[in-house]
């Protein structure tokens, strides 16, 4: 009736369940306080506590009242539900403090410290002080169960799932909000640049950790240590959901920048944005690692220690331990935590948190690594885009079949590379300055953006080797493998070394990729005249000179192609007729060039 009356009185002024419940509990507390005094007079302290526990339990667990409570809880989001639970915990603690006073009065009386009480002699003269703990434990359990466990039990069971959904919904809402703002700025909804802007908005490298930290704090407020495992599992799953969406977006981004049907993408992209993409993904990865290995232990250490201590004390079944539990101002939350938590797990977590946390973060960190690879590939493709625009014109040019050189300007009369090769050279020479400017503006993050050379630039080489049936032995050695890592340098010099490496590694990826793509397109030239062969030799020398201006470069296959296209046709015919069997790659190159020069090869 108290519930119904109060509900009716609050309906007119903007009803809020948390405020309603707080007022309901205040009224209930007043009634309990008067009731316990009467019980003490009638039964004595210990029996009064047991009667009080029964009153609270039977009142709050009345089916009609519990149904009303469940209905209101179902309307709340997780944030408000946790605050409502906090109200219930506070009420439970107030009731426990009354219980504590009852047991304290009893202990004082049996020790001769209190006033004479006939009721004690009548009702409690047969109570052994050693059995007090058992009664205290039962009373505490009954009160906490009724006030702050049973009404929320279904939410405890699905708490991790609720937090996962909460993080996921916040991230989706944030992405939608950012993309809406992007449209307001007038950026096109289509094209690679528009897709890149959307992906950059979608990373949310700081927001994901902020929401995870909020979830962790809420977990500690809600249940304490017992929910840590569920919440960390939930955050890990929420991270993977976010990373999976990023992975899909990056795949679409790579498709949009890819060269298709021999045609380059319609638009060129400034280098800063792709590098920012890679940088933000690496920042996201570092934030997740920092949250897991720094924030989680820092925020949960006290809760876990308190849980383990309370668990050991409660199991000790001693009068002092039960008294300490009852005098704990947050006893109810700890009791709920003890009901839900696993002491064995808490001990393991306390002894070796890194081992446990590493398992939780392995899948998201691996996913971040895959995202970094895709982002690096995107940066590489953007860098290569203008170069590929020139390279892809090689097979279809009619310059290679011209008989005379220089008359119409299509073949250089002065032994200089053609315009496409000059454009390639200019693109490569311009790259260091662009990279240096980015490194200067983003010195703090440059270390994160150094590429893995093993995943960039070799796609065309693999196809070339497959086409010519060659082994990897034809590849030039990595020019940067043995570079010093700067470990013994001071901070300023180390920063400069990292910036230099950032520039050189990206330049190495692009020059390596340019040579491989050039060779792949070179073999697609249908036929070669003598003048065309000489011009091709000049162009091969041109790309080698560009790379050699930065690195000590030596690609055996590139050298073999230059030698083959430079050979007099008679010498070339003799070379393929009497091949040097000790060098399979040379045979393959000479036969290919001979076929394009019109030389018939026996068995070919």
Image (cartoon, rainbow, N blue to C red):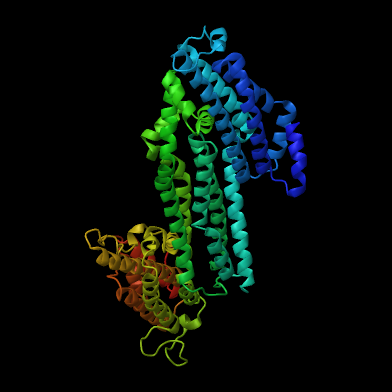
Residue 261 in view, yes or no? no
The quarter of the displayed image where residue 528 is located: bottom left
What percent of the width, then of the height, locates residue 504? 33, 68
Residue at far bottom of view: 407
Q: How many labels does the image show?
A: 0
Quarter containing the N terminus: top right
Image point (37%, 65%), residue name: 446
In the rendered view, tell whether residue 60 sits above or below residue 511: above
What percent of the width, then of the height, locates residue 302? 41, 38
530 left or right of 496 in image: right
128 and 566: which one is in front? 128
139 left or right of 595 in image: right
In the rendered view, tell whether residue 578 sits above or below residue 44: below
Image point (49%, 21%), residue name: 104
The quarter of the displayed image where residue 75 is located: top right
Image point (59%, 59%), residue name: 175
Residue at far left of view: 488
204 left or right of 25 in image: left
67 and 322: which one is in front? 322
């Amino acid at each position: 009736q108290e519930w119904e009356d109060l509900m009716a009185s609050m309906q007119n002024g903007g009803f809020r369940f948390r405020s309603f419940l707080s007022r309901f509990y205040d009224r209930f507390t007043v009634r309990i306080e008067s009731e316990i005094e009467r019980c003490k007079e009638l039964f004595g302290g210990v029996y009064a506590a047991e009667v009080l526990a029964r009153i609270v339990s039977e009142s709050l667990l009345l089916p009609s009242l519990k149904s009303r409570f469940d209905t209101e809880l179902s309307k709340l989001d997780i944030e408000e539900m946790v605050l409502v639970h906090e109200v219930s915990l506070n009420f439970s603690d107030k009731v426990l403090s009354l219980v504590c006073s009852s047991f304290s009065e009893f202990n004082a009386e049996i020790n001769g410290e209190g006033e004479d009480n006939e009721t004690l002699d009548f009702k409690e003269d047969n109570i052994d002080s050693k059995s007090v703990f058992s009664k205290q434990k039962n009373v505490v359990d009954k009160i906490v169960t009724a006030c702050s466990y049973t009404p929320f039990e279904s939410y405890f069971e699905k708490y991790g799932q609720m937090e996962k959904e909460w993080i996921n919904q916040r991230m989706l809402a944030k992405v939608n909000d950012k993309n809406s703002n992007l449209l307001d700025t007038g950026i096109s909804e289509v094209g690679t640049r528009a897709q890149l802007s959307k992906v950059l908005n979608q990373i949310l490298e700081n927001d994901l950790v902020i929401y995870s930290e909020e979830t962790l704090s809420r977990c500690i407020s809600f249940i304490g240590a017992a929910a840590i495992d569920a919440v960390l599992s939930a955050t890990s799953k929420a991270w993977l959901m976010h990373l999976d969406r990023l992975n899909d977006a990056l795949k679409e981004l790579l498709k949009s920048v890819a060269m298709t049907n021999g045609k380059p993408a319609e638009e060129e992209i400034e280098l800063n944005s792709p590098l920012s993409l890679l940088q933000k993904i690496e920042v996201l990865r570092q934030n997740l690692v920092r949250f897991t290995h720094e924030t989680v232990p820092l925020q949960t250490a006290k809760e876990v220690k308190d849980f383990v201590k309370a668990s050991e004390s409660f199991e000790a079944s001693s009068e002092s331990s039960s008294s300490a539990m009852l005098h704990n101002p947050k006893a109810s939350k700890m009791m709920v935590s003890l009901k839900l938590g696993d002491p064995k797990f808490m001990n393991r977590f306390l002894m070796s948190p890194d081992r446990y946390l590493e398992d939780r973060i392995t899948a998201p960190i691996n996913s971040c690594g895959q995202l970094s690879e895709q982002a690096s590939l995107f940066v590489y493709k953007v860098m290569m885009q203008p170069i590929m625009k020139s390279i892809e014109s090689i097979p279809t040019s009619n310059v290679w079949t011209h008989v005379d050189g220089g008359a119409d300007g299509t073949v250089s009369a002065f032994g200089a590379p053609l315009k496409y090769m000059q454009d390639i050279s200019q693109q490569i020479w311009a790259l260091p300055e662009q990279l240096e400017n980015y490194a200067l503006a983003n010195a703090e993050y440059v270390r994160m953006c150094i590429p893995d050379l093993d995943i960039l630039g070799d796609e065309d080489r693999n196809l070339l080797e497959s086409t010519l049936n060659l082994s990897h032995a034809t590849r030039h050695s990595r020019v940067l493998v043995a570079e010093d890592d700067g470990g013994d340098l001071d901070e300023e010099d180390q920063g400069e070394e990292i910036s230099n490496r950032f520039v050189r590694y990206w330049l190495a990826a692009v020059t390596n990729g340019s040579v491989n793509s050039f060779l792949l397109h070179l073999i697609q030239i249908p036929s070669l005249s003598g003048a065309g062969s000489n011009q091709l030799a000049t162009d091969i020398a041109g790309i080698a000179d560009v790379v050699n201006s930065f690195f000590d470069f030596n690609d055996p296959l590139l050298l073999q192609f230059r030698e083959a296209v430079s050979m007099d046709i008679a010498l070339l015919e003799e070379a393929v007729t009497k091949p040097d069997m000790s060098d399979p790659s040379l045979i393959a190159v000479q036969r290919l060039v001979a076929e394009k020069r019109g030389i018939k090869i026996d068995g070919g």
